[in-house]
Amino acid sequence: MTDFTKFKNELETLGEKAVREKVAIHYWSPMPSKESFALHWLSCIDKERDVEASLRRDAREEETLSIAKEANSIARSALITAHRQARYAMYAAIVATTALIISSIDLIKTALRYFFS
């Protein structure tokens, strides 16, 4: 095992928090290569964390996009249904108006017969 492999194992054993504390007090300053390696190790951890956060964010955005697409599809279906119902309501209004006119004609004929007979 090389010295850096041993040191990396030591850093992993200490854990991120302890390594950050030791770097903050320049614990390895008498050994610049170890301090530099510790900083690099912490930087790699930060980058891994950033990549993981980015992947989670991308997954959330993908899920949000999927939900939005589904909502648009549902809204489109609702719009089509609303248009169909409006058309049927218009047809019903036309039939009702026609029935009203027809019944009014019969009523007018009956009234005219009554008055002119």
Image (tube, rainbow, N blue to C red):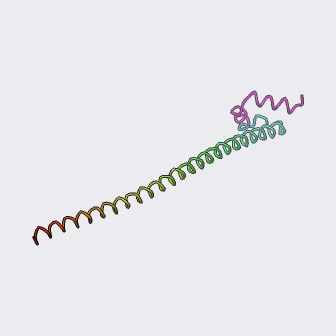
Q: Is 46 left, or right, of 106 in this rendering?
A: right
Q: Is residue 66 above or below residue 3?
A: below
Q: Quadrant of residue 92?
A: bottom left
Nearer to us in this view, 72 or 9: 72
Image x and y of residue 69, in percent: 57, 51
Judge whether residue 11 is colored magenta.
yes
Q: Quadrant of the C terminus?
A: bottom left
Residue occupying the point 61% across, 48% down: 61
Image x and y of residue 60, in percent: 61, 44
Nearer to us in this view, 49 or 77: 77
Image x and y of residue 39, in percent: 77, 40
Q: Is residue 41 above or below residue 105?
A: above
Q: Quadrant of the N terminus?
A: top right
Q: Is 81 left, or right, of 24 in this rendering?
A: left
Residue numbers of the magenta segment: 1-22
Report the predominant secondary structure element of the magenta stretch. Answer: helix
Q: Is 33 left, or right, of 104 in this rendering?
A: right
Residue occupying the point 44% across, 55% down: 82
Image x and y of residue 32, in percent: 83, 39
Judge whether residue 15 is colored magenta.
yes
Nearer to us in this view, 15 or 99: 99
Residue occupying the point 45% across, 57% down: 84
Nearer to us in this view, 34 or 93: 93
